[in-house]
Image (spheres, grey):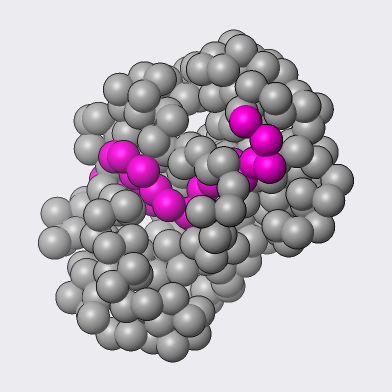
Amino acid sequence: MRIGIVHYVNSRPLSRGLLGAGGGDWICELLPPAVIADRLRDGSLDVGLVPSIELARIPGLLVVPGLAIAATHEVRSVLLVSQVPVAEIRSVALDENSRTSAALVRILLAERYGIEPEYRPARADLGAMLAVADAALLIGDPALAVPREQYVVLDLAGEWLELTGLPFVFAVWAARAEAAPRIPAGIFAASLATGLAQLDAIVGETAAETGLSEAVLRDYFTRNLSFRMGPAEQAGLAEYLRRAARAGLAPAGGPLEFLPVAVSGAG
């Protein structure tokens, strides 16, 4: 079984028990979220931490229940960073690794702020992005390092909460339907349980790699991020997909389909 894991630090608690384990049962690859979506579509991955919007774009994906990369308030790592007041934004450079957040920022700017700027893809380099656009969408590790005091910054999960009153789900474990019979039941929940049990080690390792403080990272993993997908998160995900379809950013789809695996071991 081939598993794609988002290469940002936000995936570490979810993937801790999968990496370096499994023997001949599974092989993990660390990849950008957009690449995971493309490889699920072409069949070169069986399971992946897929951007939420791809649930509407890739036919036949089954969601692993109970688990996600989500936020119930501000997420800190998905930001619109602007050189001008929001009402004056005329162009936005979009992190080329983003799909869910690229659609989300369009929804938020249109529905909350009544603006529809020009959007263009760009490499995740804040200086270069702001050299060609009024604002930049950054996701993942680059967003955590933004000097917020220098810019107008919108946290997209916080903005979504203000718009809808719901949590936002950025990514979920999803499997191609034909791979479902080969997926060992419970490995994803068990992996998160390992990650939560080893959170001190994850924080220390991530601080050493990124230069971010352990205090910031602990807050990020425990307050800004949520790794559960309960009824509120499912409602937020369904609402996002509905609004994305209404805005012409994704096909309209039916209810989510779930992989039949237990998640009682999630801790």
Where's residue 144, x and y in %? 50, 62
Image quarter in which the C terminus is found? bottom left
Where's residue 21, x and y in %? 38, 83
Residue in the picture at 56% in, 59% down: 146
195 up-or-down from 231: above or below: below
Q: Say which of 124 and 148 sits in front.
A: 148
Residue 239, quarter of picture: top left
Q: Say which of 30 and 146 sits in front.
A: 146
Residue in the picture at 25% in, 75% down: 199
Where's residue 256, x and y in %? 42, 29
Residue in the picture at 56% in, 31% down: 104
Q: Say which of 158 and 170 sits in front.
A: 158
Q: In this rendering, would 214 be left or right of 84?
A: left
Residue 248, quarter of picture: top right
Residue in the picture at 21% in, 53% down: 263
User: Which residues make up the magenta segment?
Assistant: 63-85
Q: In this rendering, would 18 be left or right of 98?
A: left
Please check the rendered image and state whether residue 78 is part of the magenta-colored stretch, yes or no.
Answer: yes
Residue 184, quarter of picture: bottom left
